[in-house]
Image (tube, coloured by chain):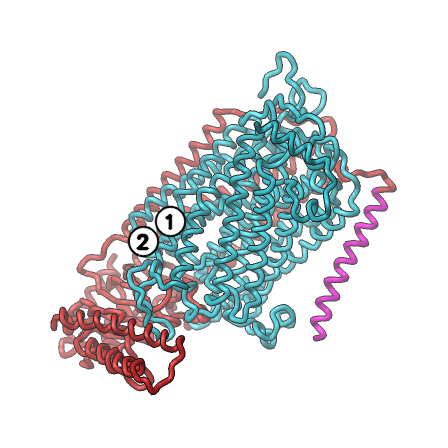
Amino acid sequence: MAAAAQEAIHEHDHHEESFVSKYIFSYDHKMIGKQFLLAAIFMGVVGMMLSVFFRIQLAWPGESSDFLNLFLGDRWAPEGILNQDMYLGLVTIHGTIMVFFVLTGGLSGTFSNVLIPLQIGARDMASGFINMMSFWLFAISSIIMLASLFVESGPAMSGWTVYPPLSALPQAVSGSGLGMTLWLTSLTIFIASSLIGSLNYISTVVNLRTKGMKMTRMPLTIWAFLITAIVGVLSFPVLLSAALLLFMDRVMGTSFYLSEIIVGGEMLDNVGGSPVLYQHLFWFLGHPEVYIVLMPALGISSEVISTNSRKPIFGYRAMIGSLLAIGFLSFIVWAHHMFVSGMDPFLGSVFVFTTLLIAIPSAVKVFNYLTTLWKGSIIFTPAMLFAIGLVSTFISGGVTGIILADSALDIQVHDTYFVVAHFHVVMGLSAIFGMFAGIYHWFPKIYGRMMNNRLGYAHFWTTIVSGYGVFLPMHFVGLGGAPRRYYNNSIFDTFNPTAGEMMLDLNVIITVFAIIGAFGQVFFFFNFFYSIFRGPKAPLNPWRSNTLEWTTPTAMPGHGNWPGDLPVVHRWPYDYSKPGADDDFIPQTVPLKPGEEEH
Amino acid sequence: MGSKLIIILVIIFGVLAIAQLVRVSELTAKHTKRKEEDIPENENKFNANMMLIFMIALYAGFIYLMLEYGYMNLGPAASAHGQEIDWLFDINWIIIVAIFFLTNSLLFIFAWKYVKKPGVKAYYYAHNNKLEMVWTVIPAAVLSVLIILGLRTWNDTTAKAGVEFEDIEIFAYQFAWTARYSGMNNELGKFDYKLTTAENPYAIMTKENIERSLSLMKVGELGQSGIQMLEDKLNDRSIMLSADERKDLEKELGRKERMSRLLEAMSITYADSLDELANDDVIVEDSLVLLKGQKYNFSFRSKDVIHSAYFPHFRAQMNTVPGMTTYFKFQPIYTTEEMKGQLDDSNFEYALLCNKICGGSHYRMKMSVKVLGPKEYLEWQKTKSTYDGTPWIEGNEAKLLEYYETITSRLDEN
């Protein structure tokens, strides 16, 4: 059946395509991947700009900035001073855009689309139409989210977690009016996009593998995308229900999350709801979401590190096992975000246990990466640099998770900048490094041209230096007891002037690095867009890699990927520097020699 | 305007500069037939060395931050359980810093050492079950210890408060805090959010407050219509109402009728003993004043949205949730004066901060906290009066002081 369907797609390919069907409403997974990538880069620029705005406020509170006035106008930055409500709007939308639109839609959307069919030897996704739908729903939800920035009463202002009652009551903060309605609408559409996308990835991996591509011969990227998609399918619906109940509380007068509230002098008659319920529902997605963001990055780095160390990835089965373990455990750790929410402390102790367990598979992954590098023959392509950067940030951000997972310690650092630093390193930096590694590595396959290496080096070094420059000091701001989402830290001057002063010093350092980091991305944007049009033509297998995507007869494969027969797989994808072989790589399509062991 | 122009120009020139650099490298590549996919040895070497340099810079930065900003002048934990938390934190911190240095060093040193060298082939090494077992079991063992230690502290910290604890209620609203002491009987007066009025902002349940709220619902006051006025208005044919206005009025009427029914029920079941509970409570709006060594059981309540009561110096935090009472207990062990000495900062003061996003002025939601010795605490108490207007303490000062002194001195002995 599947083979016949693929032939049909292949036949279809011979028709002339119009501009619209080729570039806009395309069914081709590679084009959809490119669309996701470009959309995510755009959203990433917006998210980064927002963060620069509020970092300026935090470093130089009360000082007039023409830069802020230029972008935010007199409505939100009168005389160049950021409005305190808009500050919350900026952090909220920054978080939402980065987590959902860049690191979920962008990372998983781009690379699952580009790589799944190419690496498993399929002509396209199981359903091209659903795939196209997935992108356009993503685009619509992005537009709605961006539009919410321009609403008169401001965008959602209750943090990216949008906890009710704050997010349910426009009387409590202006952003909980139309801005919040748009936020919920956007997220609902986003969830639909993510769900149908994930279903498509799962069915493609399960059904459309080419001959010989056993599950145990799949590249780790595919394993990562598969598990990510499964986790997404199981957790996003819960967020959808949370959003729906919140919507009903806001519009229809229900009391799921609201109880005994007096706001703006008005006594609400909602009784019996529980805001803690929302937190349970939100984090039931929210925590798996962290791994939805992280796992594709880990998969990409496994592939990139193995290829560029010219060594098999160490412990292939352990890598799959740890992905599965992380995927499973990610569902039973959510309440570690709620140790001080007022939930039963006994429940807290259960979640301490499960949360710390997740450190074990994570540690296994790190050690396996290290052993892969050991005695390798490392080639520092820009992709490899970013993959190594990922391992470093995964370590540095992961270890502070041990403190946060410990409920007794979380009492002190909960919701301080320590948490902000922790998750930005472990999921922000790591995931974005994974994304950059993927872009540099597969750019020749996506656009048929090479990116400039030297700009890549410059991009990597400025990014990792400024990344650590921002988030390493931020841990200490948090240890100093500074709560997150504070418009400024002037309050410290009223009870501990010395700490207040130090806090401000650190905030200036952080902001300077953030601005350097933002400018560092210019290396990337320029390199990326320039190389799409003017980069040197890519050879078929530039990184001398084993996986199937490099076996297509053209550098930029057409619709259907392989014009003739689909490739047949004979071995796992990590035969690098295998003893007895002439070359230091053996593509998956090369049959085993008589007497050769698979691995 | 001038600086806006400069910003734009800087960006434009930046892009142009990169474009020129690329052009140069493009031309040299053409000239030397260099291909992007073949990384030249010198570039590879450069990145390998950068790995080592970066590692050293990272560690230098980290150590500098540790020395300079270690605990950022939060000072030693000012509560009994806080000391336990700090001890646990130190253990965890040592372990994670060790892992941080060890694994990052391996990573960057491997990256530097195993850079591609001509004639050297990578070592084909696909798996080793024993090795993998080792690095599964070691983290598991370390984590088990951390889990056990962590849960022990957590259970102590969150255990139910005993009778020796004094009850204080912290009431949170946008954007301030109020403390209510339970007074001489150490029992807080009851509350119900429906009783909130301008005269009774903390919704405390007394007979008088119930009656006032009830009359407000039924009769109303200046600027706020009661049920009667609403009914009159709806039935008055001489007033022209649009459909929307009528609907709004009907909605308000319905709400008020429900509220007044509930208030009536409250007034019927009301027992006079509840007045006694409430009348000796002491409400304090400016700062929370605590006695050194006294164990406190805080209950938290919110009027509008979720806030979080964060006492950074006491290592204490609990969300305040509308519709739900939450608890946290701690025992302050240093007076404000002692802490000033410890931190060598004469302006130091303890604080209660809001640590859950709650609206525009979230960052200003603070209450100052003072921990006093027995004498000063008693002096402060004497200036306060209870809910029904009588002085907090009457007559038995000497006895109280003696009692406070035993509490504080017991702490000093330990």
Q: Is residue A487 visible?
A: yes
Please determine whether, in this image, residue A471 is positioned above or below residue B293. above
User: What percent of the width, then of the height, locates residue B244?
Assistant: 40, 75
Q: Amino acid at mark 2?
A: Met
Please tell me whether residue B42 belongs to the stretch shown in magenta.
no
Q: Looking at the image, which residue sits at the far left?
A: B272
Please tell me whether residue B27 belongs to the stretch shown in magenta.
yes
Secondary structure mostly taken by the magenta-highlighted segment of the chain:
helix
Task: Count residues near mark 2 (Cα–Cα under 10 Å), then give few for <14, some for 14-19, many for 20+.
Answer: some
Q: Which residues are magenta?
A: B1-29
Residue, disc 1: A335
Say which quarter of the image contains residue B15: bottom right
Labels 1 and 2 touching (C-beta < 8 A):
yes
Q: Is residue B316 visible?
A: no
Q: Amino acid at mark 1?
A: Ala
Question: Chain B is shown in which shade?
Answer: red
Output the chain of dot 2.
Answer: A
Please determine whether, in this image, residue B234 is positioned above or below residue A25. below
Residue, disc 2: A343
Residue at the image point whose x is 58% and y is 21% from the top: A599
